[in-house]
Amino acid sequence: MAFLEIRDLYKTIAGADILKGIDITLDKGGFLVLVGPSGCGKSTLLNTVAGLTDVTKGDIVIDGEIVNDLHPSKRDIAMVFQSYALYPNMTVEGNIAFALEMRGVPKSERDEAVRAAAKTLQIEHLLKRRPSQLSGGQRQRVAMGRALVRKPRVFLFDEPLSNLDAKLRVEMRAEIKRLHRDTGATIVYVTHDQIEAMTMATKIAVLKEGIVQQVGSPEEIYRRPANLFVADFMGSPAMNLLEGKVVTNGAERAIEFAGSGSDGPIRLAMPSSVRETTFVDGQSVILGIRPEAITDRGLTDPEATTVSIVDALVDLVEPTGSDTFVVTKIAGKEITARVRSDVDARAGETFQFAFNLDKAVVFDPKTTKRLA
Amino acid sequence: MSAAATSVSPGSARFARYFIYATLVIFALIYLLPLFVMIITSLKPLDEIRSGNMLALPQAPSLDAWFKAWGTACVGVNCTGISGYFWNSIKMVIPAVAISTILGALNGYVLTKWRFPGHKLVFGMMLFACFIPFQAVLIPMARVLGEIGLSNTTAGLVLVHVVYGLGFTTLFFRNYYEAFPDELIKAAQMDGAGFFKIFWRILLPSSGPIIVVTVIYQFTNIWNDFLFGVSFASGGGAPMTVALNNLVSSSTGVKEYNVDMAAAMFAALPTLIVYVVAGRYFVRGLMAGAVKG
Ligand SMILES: Nc1ncnc2c1ncn2[C@@H]1O[C@H](COP(=O)(O)OP(=O)(O)OP(=O)(O)O)[C@@H](O)[C@H]1O
Ligand SMILES: [Mg+2]
């Protein structure tokens, strides 16, 4: 049974519907990441779970108990805020021990717990300092220590790494992941960094304007996005989305795209994911294909069953070191392909792209939903 | 300033600077002059005051006038000095400042961190209280004090000053707490701290500058108040300011300027001390408020 359940949750603030029927469940020990563009309601959702704002309609259920009317301190939830929210007038030790003190835990036990948490986070040498004397990364650790020391049923993180520089962020990301593995904690984590989402989550929920677009494992979200929004939002560089028409190519169906300039139309085989779907000739579809599924011929997956080879003019070459992104135009849209770094692709020249259509998905342009 | 300095020659820039400093010094002297006259006059005997120059230093400084003002000068018909009235003022100012500051802090806390429907209206009305002139509240206030039996008492004066000061102290604290991060309150709530625990443990320890500003502001206003004092507490319960007025205007025989000045110094001393001790924080607190808006 799910440990944390959000059931048909609505939240209205000042007459505006911020959350519109959220349904998410999370198992004990799971790591749920909420992603979505700014203002989509991630923090609001987290606040309702924490009890810092009340819900307009729907239920928050923890371990089988509806907690809608339970005060935040009674929910046994700890939260790490984006600004860390460390108490400026207390030492690090005081900050970490505060929750225990409020719960009437005796001093000796408190000290013990603070030491243990500090040890886990390697901040033992900072215990006597005040928050203003700490670096960003250290503050972040203290904020985590404050949550950790309570051993709560659920941890909530609201963009905890967004104030850190890139290197520290990668470090802390690994640390949170390790913490999750070691403690088996149940975590809800908000971010709009999709790499964070992909690397840490056991489950991702993509939100847009207060509506859940898709809930699933990182792999599901990445491989089989439920709609165009999710396809475009997750992944960097973004998934290539090409509008074309269904045509019959001998016995097989294919998708035809307008060529660029003087070139004729381009045909790609029907992706494997929609083998069973019925199409009519001339039907508009949007093909979604990740950059790593468009490669040079040599890098093509030997297992692939459906590959189309396309000659196209190279617009731009972006080497990243490990591999190279090649940008071309098909049907008037920029397409990014990911090729080996030692492949000789030059802007202004023609290049042979291999489209691995086993890894492509197809969307209906009207409903924006993925066709299965 | 620096742009102007670079556009002119170094010599004239220095001259401009000297000119500014000289002006500042002159104005400072003008402001300090009355204090200087008060002090030297209080240290001179009466003959010397009548015959000599007002600005001349005393030939044989003595504290006689100070002792007389404190212990034996006649205020109205009682010749027991101003000491009793001084303590009246102390007994009025300390509770009045403490209560109005604490209530202002609580109001500010509620108006920013525990908002309720209509909080804007309530704050608006409290702000309005800051602009009501003293004279407008005299008669209603006298009625109220009479009804609750606090006429002519120090407790009554304390009540008046607390009520009148509440608008200001609330304004100070509200603006200060407005800039205080809400997330800290949320974090404390999740940590299990209640309304007063959050106030006491999180908010108040971070309120040093604004407490200093409020205390100085309230202390000076309440200590220096004359109108409320003369209206609601005449006679033996009168505060220092009222007694000083009575002392100076007591027309028994010759005018003892040295005693008057000494008494005035006693009246001014507490506010002076408060400024000297906490003035630095006062300026800092005002600046902090100004920057955070
Ligand atoms: N107190 C409030 N009054 C009115 N609208 C609010 C209030 N708080 C939040 N909102 C609105 O609710 C929406 C969701 O806000 P929320 O803070 O949950 O977004 P978010 O997904 O966390 O965004 P971000 O990624 O920028 O943190 C926003 O459009 C915001 O304007
Ligand atoms: Mg947010």
Image (cartoon, coloured by chain):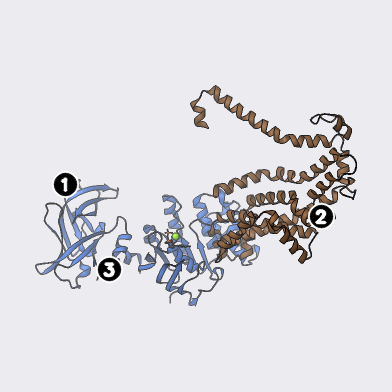
Q: Drawn colour of chain A?
A: blue
Between B243 and A47, the one lying in front of the other is: B243
Q: Nearer the viewer, mark 3 or mark 1?
A: 3
Residue to which mark 3 is pinned: A369
- Secondary structure category for the residue under label 3: loop
Residue A224 at what x, y percent from top left?
A: 29, 66
Looking at the rendered image, the disc whose residue lies closer to the viewer, 3 or 2, is: 2
* A350 and A69: which is toward the camera: A69
Name the residue type under label 1: Glu
Q: Which numbered marker is on residue A349?
A: 1
Residue farthest toward the left in the current orientation of the protein: A250
Whether the residue carrying mark 3 lies under 8 Å from ligand 1 is answered with: no
B207 versus B279 height, above or below: below
Q: Quadrant of ligand 1?
A: bottom left
Instruction: Confirm whether circles 3 and 1 share one chain.
Output: yes
Q: Are marks 1 and 2 in contact (CB under 8 Å)?
A: no
Classify residue A303 as left or right of residue B171: left
Give the percent coordinates (x, y) of residue A76.
54, 69
Q: CA distance from mark 3 to mark 1?
A: 36 Å
Q: Residue at x 90, y 48 (%)?
A: B79
Q: Pointer 2: residues within 10 angstroms few (<14), some, or many (20+)?
A: some
Closer to the eye: label 1 or 2: 2
Q: Which chain is brown?
A: B
Q: Is residue B46 above or below residue A198?
A: above
Q: Amino acid at mark 3?
A: Lys
The residue tagged with tag 2: helix, strand or loop?
Answer: loop
Q: Which residue is mark 2?
A: B234
